[in-house]
Amino acid sequence: MAEASPRHEFVRLLEPVVRDAARLARQLEGQVVNEPKRGETDAVKQALTEADTRVQELLLEALAAHFPEVSLAAEEDTPRVASFPASSASQVVIDPIDGTLNSYLEGRGPYALMMGLVVGGRYEAAFVALPREGLLYAAARGEGAFGARAGSPLRRIEAADRGDRILVTHGTPAAAHRWLSEQGIEVIPCCGGAAAIAPLVVGCRAGLRWSPGSGLGVSVRGRIGALIAAEAGARVRSESGAFPTDATTPSATLRVTARADDDELLARALEEAGFSP
């Protein structure tokens, strides 16, 4: 019998704790307050709650038990981070609560819990949970994408037009929102993790992430869901074509759709907002 791949084992072994962590995040909603991080000047990046730290520590406890040799790109500086090596052949990227300020604390659209395995500079396995919606998604490269409602087993899932809504990340220009609304589309603000798996979410047809500026653009953490969407057969595009399969090639935008015409729709919305590659 062939030995299971590390990416397959990552999903199999960590699925239970991702479910537990999503439940914890949901339980803590409305019970925690913002305790801004020092050293950050942007309110979104400053946002931090007890939920962020407790969820991350729960994930790290299980990660240390199953994959102690990996290095981390963890969003928060929690106690267990120091127990992992500073560098290794494999890296695990974690965002315990993506959208802390706008989505988790202020309740504007879905927030997400995200964790992914990077090997050789590209994502090989990934989880995205939407705790408020009770949804979990996972993928291992080359093995398809899987989704589940809370309490149900993971089942293979494919990208589809699942409704009239388009998930658009916080900070996307109002002009893009306005143009999409004028086309008769319901635009829902969300965190980046939710936008990246939008065609897998009931009621949604596409997702758009806007992250212009210097540097990487769409962050390393923001790319976790792109693997899941691609494995589900979604169109995963950037401003210059196919979205990068690695974790470090710069990209200012991410468009995730089940249909070519929706991809064209999102590209036009960006143009209406004044964005040009």
Image: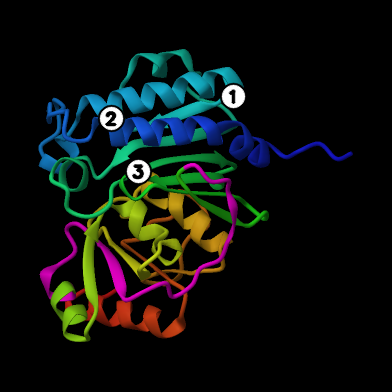
- Residue 17: x, y in percent? 49, 29
Could you tell which of marks 1 and 2 lies nearer the N-terminus? Answer: 2
Q: Is residue 71 left or right of residue 119?
A: left
Q: Amino acid at mark 2?
A: Asp
Q: Secondary structure at mark 3?
A: helix
Q: Amino acid at mark 3?
A: Pro
Could you tell which of marks 3 and 2 lies nearer the N-terminus? Answer: 2
Mark 3 lies on residue? 131
Q: Nearer the viewer, residue 247 or 127?
A: 127
- Residue 113: x, y in percent? 37, 41
Using a 10 Å C-alpha cutoff, classify the residue at mark 1 as few (fewer than 14 neighbours), some (14 to 19) or many (20 or more): some
Label 3 close to label 1 by CB (< 8 Å): no
- Which residue is rendered at x = 37% and y = 27% of the image? 56
Q: Amino acid at mark 1?
A: Phe
Evaluate whether residue 11 shows in this view: yes
Could you tell which of marks 3 and 1 lies nearer the N-terminus? Answer: 1
Residue span colored magenta: 151-176
Please give the label number shown on residue 67: 1
Evaluate whether residue 220 shows in this view: no
- Which residue is rendered at x = 13% and y = 77% of the image? 178
Q: Which of the two marks, 3 or 2, is nearer to us in this view?
A: 3
Which quarter shows the C terminus? bottom left
